[in-house]
Image: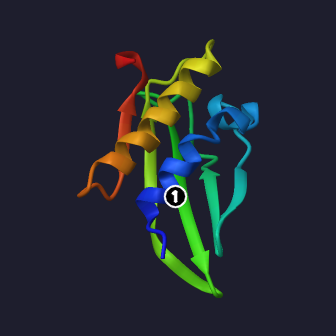
Amino acid sequence: MADIKEIAGHLAGLVDQLPLIYVTFDAREANFRFDFGDIGCALHKHPRSAQTIRPPWLHYELTTARGGGRHADPVPIWLKNPSGQDPERNRAALRRALELFRDTPTAVMVQVNVEDM
């Protein structure tokens, strides 16, 4: 059975396909759904993501389901200080966050500061 780390790595490869709403301060909620074998997966962008809070954040959650139940615990993903003018920088930070989660055995959540990219 695939684990959540493998799924995060797969999603890192799909980041370029995400609509612009995922990497901007667009206040609408969004769900990107995909399958990983028999596991249903979703990247949920929370509508609480805001440029007006200090520091600004984009907040995501990776969820998985299998056979009508949860496959693994949800993974919170935070992008701190995302760019308001450069969505591609935010896209790169989201990809990096997913890769960090994939490559860090003990991680249960991940945070990336976009200003450090």
Query: In which image quadrant can residue 15 be found?
Result: top right
Task: Give x and y (percent) for residue 86.
Answer: 61, 14
Residue 57 shows in this picture: no
Task: Give x and y (percent) for residue 33.
Answer: 72, 58
Where's the C terminus, which quadrant? top left
The single residue placed furthest to the top in the displayed view is: 85
Front in this rendered view, residue 48 or 4:
4
Which residue is located at x 35 percent, y 53 percent?
Answer: 109
Task: Give x and y (percent) for residue 95.
Answer: 51, 35
Vertical position of residue 68 compared to residue 46: above or below? below
* Amino acid found under the numbered disc labelled 1: Ile
SS state under label 1? helix
Vertical position of residue 108 compared to residue 117: above or below? below
Front in this rendered view, residue 11 or 87:
11
Instruction: From the image, tell me which residue sits under label 1.
Output: 7
Residue 84 shows in this picture: yes
